Image (cartoon, grey):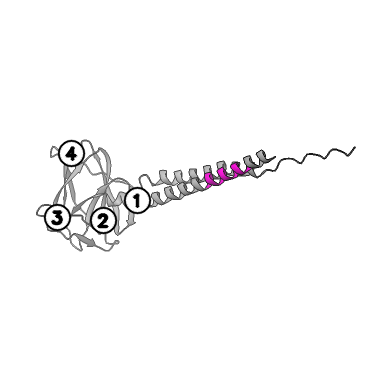
Amino acid sequence: MTQRAGRRGWMLVVGVLVLVGFLVAAVALWIAGGNREADNVAGFARAPVGCDTTLDFESTGAFVLYVETSGEFDELAGACDAPQQYDRDPDDVPTVELILRDVDGADIAIDDTADVSYDVDGFVGSSIGEVQIESTGDHVLTVSPTGGDAFAVAVGRQPDEGVALLRWGAIAAAIAGLVVGGIFLVVGSRRPPVQPTPPAP
């Protein structure tokens, strides 16, 4: 009887630990998903207006161009005279003339893209085109001057890239914790059947 009670207690402890552990992992993954978009946007390359900006592409594939009405540059290299911080009315998105040249100096076509926007950690942008990068290395992006307040052109992938994977991971961890931990708790909480008392002689 004592051995069975000890086994039930062990299962209850394991069930609580599994449930709490998976729920903590689920919360951590959900928070990481929320921070992923901010990290993606912060990692975009940025080109100021009226300058030739060298962009070092470390990978190939599709990249989206965004008009970023609010944000800041980490630093401005060369002789480009542009404000390091910019904050333009997000409804006043200018018509931008862009030229992107590859490592050989050839122009890269800028195609239409789906409407994508972001507003996170002080960066506000909306997509204006998409390019296909065929080779890694230094590319040069020229942003022609326009009137009005300052802005920048950001280059990167989708702002929510990887967010859905982390969100689904959080949901899967929560479900796994509830199922596995629940099984241990249910089994551990069961009481053994009461044995009938033999009749007195």
Pick out the residue farthest to the left. 79
Q: Earlier in the sequence, mark 1 or mark 2?
A: 1
Q: Specify start and end residues of the magenta stretch as a single range.
A: 8-19
User: CA gap, disc 2 to disc 3?
Assistant: 15 Å
User: CA gap, disc 1 to disc 2?
Assistant: 15 Å
Report the side of 28 relative to 140 (left or right).
Answer: right
User: CA gap, disc 2 to disc 4?
Assistant: 24 Å
Residue designated by label 1: 37
Residue at 18% across, 39% down: 137
Which dot, 1 or 2, sits closer to the camera? 1
**Front residue (pair 193, 160):** 193
Q: Amino acid at mark 4?
A: Gly
Quarter of the rendering occupied by the N terminus: top right
Which dot, 4 or 3, sits closer to the camera? 4
Q: Amino acid at mark 3?
A: Gly
Please tell me whether mark 4 sits on a helix, a strand or a loop.
strand
Q: Amino acid at mark 2?
A: Glu
User: CA gap, disc 4 to disc 3?
Assistant: 22 Å
Q: Are marks 2 and 3 in contact (CB under 8 Å)?
A: no
User: CA gap, disc 3 to disc 1?
Assistant: 28 Å
Q: Earlier in the sequence, mark 4 or mark 3?
A: 3
Residue designated by label 2: 68
Please tell me whether mark 3 sits on a helix, a strand or a loop.
loop
Which dot, 3 or 1, sits closer to the camera? 1
Classify 10 Å Cα crowding around label 4: few (below 14), some (14-19), many (20 and above).
some
Residue designated by label 4: 137
Q: Are marks 2 and 4 in contact (CB under 8 Å)?
A: no
